[in-house]
Image (cartoon, grey):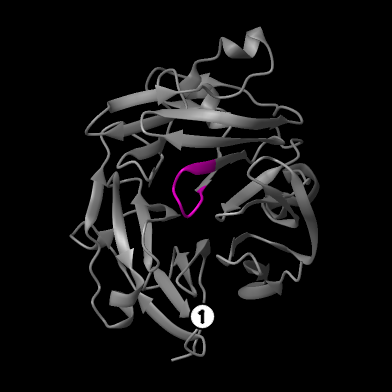
Amino acid sequence: NHELILGRPYIIHYADSSVVIYDDINDSIFTLIDLRDNNSVYHFGKRGEGNNEFLQVFSLCSLYGDSLIGVYDVYKRNLVEMNLRQIKQGNIQFPVLMQDSLMSLNICPTQYDTYLGLGFYENNMFSLTGKHIGSRYYYEYPYRDKQEKEVKNRLRGMAYQGTLSSNKSLNRFVFAIGSAPIFSLYSVNKDNIDKSFEFVGGYPEYKTEDTGTTRSAPMSVANKMAFIKAYATEKYVYLLYSGNSYKEVGVKAFNGKIIYQLAWDATPICKFVLDFPIMNFCVSDSDDTIYALMDKEEVELVKYSLNL
């Protein structure tokens, strides 16, 4: 079966010489393309409240093990395991790895038997949860000055939403912000998160609305979107950059055609300028190929070779 029909794909992830796509409106919400097996296509995964079903997939992440991917459901607040080899054999099971109790937006594992969380926590941006440490919190969302620092962290976080992606060893991660040219690199150890690098090229314009029961931080349509997606491999970090505003180009501001590649010590490696804007992307473990979702009226899966 080689038929690849995409509805509204949001997320793409590489593992075990395969690409997995999360699609919001297809009957089967996941599509697996086996790049080793003549690009064979598998459709699987159902929406629902039952076991092995999903309400709202927020992210796909690396897990320990070649053929494993983590899936975080932000409504069920759980991280489950997707075993690609089992799925190719027709065994569609998603065992729960972690049930979140901190109202996290995103969860991914670390190599230290802990779980890294991203959320609109009361005073912080990240959490680390594990049996030996309980739950600990780290860092807060960016702010340009004292006045913005006074905005509640939970509210400010809505203006600084972004992409979290970790390396295959699960001891480093990148957080890149969509509404402003800001990204940070972090390392994780047994009981701490350390920021190793931060780039700040500007701040977003936004208003805050807090009624006590609802919170929001609507953006200025003149904001130039920045790092709309990020992806990490063992050796490198990749940042997809837009540079366009909603006022100028509408929803196309959430696509980009520039990908910055840098090492984990923040050394710039390469700048790739694509021929057409893409929505999202992933990179092979060997850093030789980018797989991207491109919206040309219909969404296509495209491949770029990185012959460095």
Q: Residue at x 38, y 69 (%)?
A: 67
Q: Residue at x 30, y 42 (%)?
A: 113
Residue type for callout 1: Ile
Q: Is residue 274 left or right of residue 44?
A: right
**Residue closer to the observer: 258 or 208:** 258
Percent position of residue 240, x then y: 69, 52
Does the segment drawn in magenta span residue 110?
Answer: no
In the rendered view, would you say 84 is above or below 227? below
Label 1 Cα neighbours within 10 Å, binned few <14 / some 14-19 / many ≥20: few
Instruction: Assign the magenta stretch its main secondary structure.
Output: loop
Percent position of residue 87, x then y: 31, 76
Q: Is residue 288 left or right of residue 151?
A: right
Write the start and end of the magenta stretch as one range.
166-173
Residue at numbered disc 1 = 5
Q: Residue at x 45, y 51 (%)?
A: 169
Q: Is residue 244 left or right of residue 213?
A: right
Which of the image's four quarters has the C terminus? bottom right
In the rendered view, would you say 142 is above or below 176? above
Q: Is residue 168 left or right of residue 70?
A: right
Percent position of residue 166, x then y: 50, 48
Which element is circle 1 on? loop
Does the segment drawn in magenta span residue 167?
Answer: yes
Which of the image's four quarters has the N terminus? bottom left
**Residue closer to the observer: 150 or 174:** 174
**Residue closer to the observer: 65 or 95:** 65
Percent position of residue 257, x then y: 76, 58
Residue 135 seen in render = yes
In the rendered view, would you say 21 is above or below 239? below
